[in-house]
Amino acid sequence: MDLIKKDFLFQDIRKLRGIGSQLSKYLKKRKIEKIKDIILNLPYSETDRSKISNLNELEIGKIQTIKVNVKRLNFPRIRNLPNRIICRDDTGEIDIVYFNSREGYLRKIFPLGKWIIVSGKVNFFKKKYQITNPDYVTTIDNQEYVLKNIPKYNLTKGINEKKYRSISEQVTQNLPNIDDWLSENFIKENKLLNWNETIKKLHNTDESRNLKSESFRRLVFDEICANFLTLSKNRKRIKKTKKVKKFNNTYAEKVLLNLPFNLTFDQKKVLNEINSDLKNSDRMFRILQGDVGSGKTIVSLLSIANVIEAGYQCALMGPTEILSRQHYEQAKQIFKNMNINVEFLSGKTDSKIRKKILDNLIKGKTKLLIGTHALFQKKIIFKNLGYVVIDEQHKFGVKQRSELASKGGKNCDVLLMSATPIPRTMMMSIYGDMDISKITNKPSNRKKIITLSKPEKKINELWPFIEKQIKEDNQIFWVCPLIKESKFLDYSSAKKRYDMIKKKFSNKVGLIHGSLEKGEKEDVLKSFLNKKIHILVSTTVIEVGIDFPNASLIIIENANKFGLAQLHQLRGRVGRGSKQGTCVLLFKESLSQNAIKRLKILKNSNDGFYIADEDLKLRGFGDLTGYQQSGMKIFRFADPVLHNDLFKLAEEFIFSINNDVDINKYNFLLKLFDKADIINIGEV
């Protein structure tokens, strides 16, 4: 393949004819920065310009194409008046109107006495048809360029259809002849198309809107393969040789003897998987998935005890100070009789204490450091870091995770933890470079959360129940979808609800929402944790796995507007102590059949993994609330429900090429979907 042609698609869009600095700014607003972004920006519809209409057949407000004769050109010398070209056919007359157009240009495209093709939106002004600034004006011998269904793209201000079409065609008509990474037999057997044919069809037919067409399925398959191939390459880099960690479970067994409960079957199974990895000569890069309240933290602390026994330091990181401090308090409690030095570090740590912690770390006195992203800073140097545990891992970026793991060098094992259940269909797509452990059952002392639904008009029935909860020294979450009132969306406002509840319960009410600074949020959550607040009115910022053992009731307004997975995460904020947890779902009366199904699934199940699967089936991947925010919406074209067979096919394909000596032939594919420069999570 010619190198210049091969690299053509990855050059800046300004390399194309007709794109200057201003137009490139407009295109970049649509995330079109490289030439390849143009071929991935598929048309969403078509504009029908295929039929020539007589002037007596025109419809006002509609885009139509006409064949007319130029009769007169009117260029007024009075400023701000438009230029007019009077045209006719055998059935009538029309004005073609231009504002701020050069006279010489108009004389050129509207030659007097000549027949021309004009296409644009028809208006009616002063009892006469007119087309203002038509989209197309061309000669009769070039009419085929206009007389067709023309692809319609999502564009931004400053770019019209005609201009963008010329840019798109400049690319699609000059595609380099790419050597396909799929064999002809594979393409034929699986009813796909070759790459070049795929791109041309997607831009010149209606196949881009048919999500099951051969060309669209080929694009989807390529996108999935690019994702899987990236994860596969990452996995190979991560699984480097390290020193074997030697321990006899002595420390972990001491911890277990002092626990007031027994581990569940799943907790024991997962701990064995982690221990096996720690003792292995390959680096561990494992994700521990566990539903809310399933006991992931105690499993991680037991594995930390084993690594400390093996002679290494450990780091445990959480996304917020309050969650990290909860881990710190728990760790101090379970290691209190074991002479294990546990330290806590955050951005708020006093400078003198911080200096002492850093000194203890580099000397190896601190065995376990717990904290927030402050652990990433360059000044934080461990003597012998051998294990990193990252909680709520999706809140951290790939680069951050890699930076922390690199502090331990090649002997550092990594465990990520997540309380966000992922549908089975998505496992390979998100965690394909990791080994996966799952805790599906919860400790036996946890009571099943009672889930009720109630129409919002009966909200007054809740006040006696809330009063009873407060008298019993319980705390309540009240969740609303928006911060302010919106006249466009029928959501309740957290601020409005806070004001209303405060009138009923005076100074026992707090408010937290996404517009607060990080420090302000944590201050409010601390007040709630310390029982200074009885009712916390909130937007969905309380989703993260903080443990509020005294919270027994959560009320979620407009529950039908949330995704199932998100509702389940919110519900998991209560019932984490010994008290019975209750979740009340408030809804408007006009519920869709889909919304009714979702609420029914939630009321009948406390299993987050089952709920995530059902959510995917009901809503489709593109509409899964919470996934985009969590960094999990990783596909632009692929839908795990609609294209389930392609996910399976891609998995088989990647497995079959895993030992492919010529891995470079897939570099074009990786660059096409912006995977080539992704930072390797586990590479150090």
Image (tube, rainbow, N blue to C red):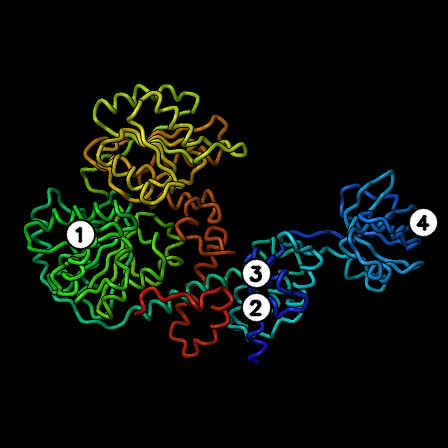
CA separation, marks 1 and 4?
87 Å
Tell me which amino acid carries mark 1: Lys
Which dot marks residue 90? 4
Q: In front: mark 1 or mark 3?
A: 3
Given residues 204 and 509, the one toward you in this image is: 509
- The reply to whether residue 269 is in sight is no
Give the residue drawn at x 10%, y 45%.
259
Q: Earlier in the sequence, mark 2 or mark 1?
A: 2
The secondary structure type at the circle numbered 4 is loop
Vertical order, 451 against 684 (above or below): above
Q: Disc 1 marks which residue?
A: 268
Q: Disc 2 marks which residue?
A: 12
The secondary structure type at the circle numbered 1 is helix
Tell me which amino acid carries mark 4: Asp
Q: Earlier in the sequence, mark 4 or mark 3?
A: 3
Tell me which amino acid carries mark 3: Ile
The local crowd at label 1, few if under 14, some if 14 to 19, many if 20 or more residues have their Cα within 10 Å, is few
CA separation, marks 2 and 1?
53 Å
Q: In front: mark 2 or mark 4?
A: 2
- The reply to whether residue 270 is in sight is yes
Give the residue drawn at x 31%, y 28%.
509
Q: In front: mark 1 or mark 4?
A: 4
Q: In front: mark 2 or mark 1?
A: 2
Which dot marks residue 32? 3
Q: Earlier in the sequence, mark 3 or mark 2?
A: 2
